[in-house]
Amino acid sequence: MGRIVYEDKNLRLEYVNDGNYIHETWWGITTSEVFYKLLNIIVDELNKTNADGLILDAREHKGLSPEAQEVAAKAIGGYAKEHGKFKEAIIVPKDIFSRFSVENYAKKVKIDTPVDTRFFDNLEAAEEWHREK
């Protein structure tokens, strides 16, 4: 798969060269304070790798507050504006509240940004989409 660039109890980040993207895997409950710290790490990795996209695997995550969704949308949208086009694949979460959370985030990140967000039921389809040129 990819090269692990960060891992803790809530998040694992892998850089995947074939497709030039960061694969985020989230688990459990993340407070806003912890999420903001992790979001900074994600943006730093995007900048270090000059990634063209993200896979957001939130199947085991329990969602984010509306404020955290807004902050994430601004951070990822800002990176996309600086970088140019940007692909974001979201693996649909199992938890209904987490599903609402990523759907709201996706609506916010699309506002005035070049982010192409798509939802997938499985990781394989998201990876395939990222490998397409």
Image (cartoon, grey):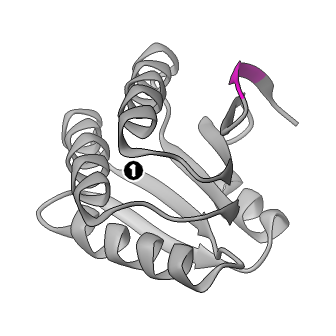
Local secondary structure at mark 1: strand
- Indicate whether 35 appears above or below 55: above
Does residue 2 appear in this view? Answer: yes
Does residue 133 appear in this view? Answer: no
**Residue 71 position in % (x across, y down):** 23, 47
In the picture provided, is 95 more to the left or to the right than 113? right
**Residue 40 position in % (x across, y down):** 37, 25
Look at the image and tell me in which quarter the N terminus lies: top right
Most common secondary structure along the magenta stretch: strand
Q: Which residue is tagged 1?
A: 86
Residue at 49% across, 58% down = 88
Identify the residue at the far top of this view.
Answer: 48
Query: What is the quadrant of residue 114 in the picture?
Result: bottom left
- Indicate whether 70 appears above or below 10: below
**Residue 13 position in % (x across, y down):** 67, 32
Q: Nearer the viewer, residue 70 or 97?
A: 97
In the picture provided, is 30 more to the left or to the right than 16? left
Query: What is the quadrant of residue 36 in the picture?
Result: top left
Q: Which residues are magenta?
A: 4-8
Query: What is the quadrant of residue 21 in the picture?
Result: top right
Is residue 89 rendered magenta in the image? no
Q: 10 Å neighbourhood of mark 1: few (<14), some, or many (≥20)?
A: many
Residue at 50% across, 32% down = 51
In the picture provided, is 98 more to the left or to the right than 131? left
Is residue 7 rendered magenta in the image? yes
Identify the residue at the far left of this view.
Answer: 112
